[in-house]
Image (tube, rainbow, N blue to C red):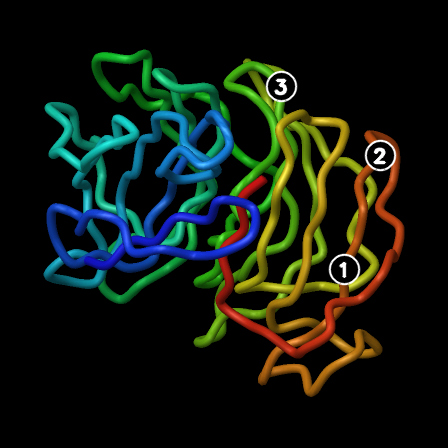
Amino acid sequence: KLSQTYDGSAWSAGPDMVEIDAQVGAVGTLGAPGTPGPEGGGPAILFGGATGGPTGVNGFTWNTTAFATSPADLSVRRAEPFGFGTVPTANCWGGNQGAPLHQVNTGEIFDGTSWAASPATMTQARSTGGGGQYGAGTTSAATIAGGGTPPSAPPTQSAVSESWDGTSWSATPTLNYGRRGGGMVGETSTYALVFAGNADPPAPGPGAQGSTATELWDGTSWSATTNMANFKQYVAGAG
């Protein structure tokens, strides 16, 4: 349930979440420097996750001061989903569903009041693989990359990248390294970073124990950039 905030130089304890959650999806907006809150201080929406079971539907909101239970839950249970959007709207795609767990390519869209299933499908069924590798962009234009794919358990690392135009998904150039459980940051669909996670060789790092590999998306292709200092996996990113 713990939360922490970052003011640009140091971390500090924030208010507890409503309940214990893991593997949630989230979207948020930037706020004023030093203002507590996900991604620097703006309002945020959290959804899904592993809540009292393998997957959940619960939704939560952050108003820059406290967490609260959202009146709207996802229509189906899912953990480790990709999330992107501009609060008060949000997109939730992929993730793990069912028992036994399996990755899916379906999604839901939040209009500020309720979630509704989208008729579109991702180009590949997958989950984030446990990290903050959510997505970059808005409700109408976004990019997602990497994740974990079926049918193995734990899932296989994916290098797939795809773009969302508000209506449908289309394939974009792949990552240099397949990875799951990494982090992803970016406020637009044409500029983003992915980093760390369980990455396929020849990515720097011990593979299943994490990687330092970082890649930059410029709207056209992914390119390797400065690696992280330490191997990491199952990370979250904001910025």
Where is residue 1 shown, x and y percent of the image?
Answer: 19, 58
Secondary structure of the residue carrying numbered label 3: loop
Instruction: Judge left or right: residue 144 versus residue 172.
Output: left
Secondary structure of the residue carrying numbered label 1: strand
Residue marked by disc 3: 141
Q: Earlier in the sequence, mark 3 or mark 1?
A: 3
Q: Residues within 10 Å of mark 1 (few under 14, many from 20)?
A: many
Q: Which amino acid does the dot numbered 1 rest on? A: Thr
Instruction: Judge left or right: residue 11 versus residue 228.
Output: left
Between 31 and 187, the residue placed more toward the observer is 31
Real-space CA distance between mark 1 and mark 2, rounded to the nearest whole angstrom: 13 Å
Real-space CA distance between mark 2 and mark 3, rounded to the nearest whole angstrom: 14 Å
Query: Residue at position x 68%, y 71% from top?
Result: 199
Q: Which amino acid does the dot numbered 3 rest on? A: Ala
Instruction: Judge left or right: residue 205 versus residue 21.
Output: right
Where is residue 103 shown, x and y percent of the image?
Answer: 42, 55
Query: Residue at position x 14%, y 62% from top?
Result: 53
Task: For the residues labelled 1 and 2, say whether their Cβ atoms are less than 8 Å apart.
Answer: no
Query: Residue at position x 28%, y 13% from top?
Result: 112
Where is residue 221 shown, x and y percent of the image?
Answer: 87, 40
Where is residue 170 shown, x and y percent of the image?
Answer: 69, 29
Residue marked by disc 1: 214
Q: Which amino acid does the dot numbered 2 rest on? A: Asp
Between 85 and 33, the residue placed more toward the observer is 33
Q: Earlier in the sequence, mark 2 or mark 3?
A: 3
Secondary structure of the residue carrying numbered label 2: loop
Instruction: Judge left or right: residue 184 versus residue 109.
Output: right
Which of the labelled discs sits on residue 218, or is there none?
Answer: 2
Task: For the residues labelled 3 and 1, say whether their Cβ atoms are less than 8 Å apart.
Answer: no
State which mark lies toward you, 3 or 1.
1
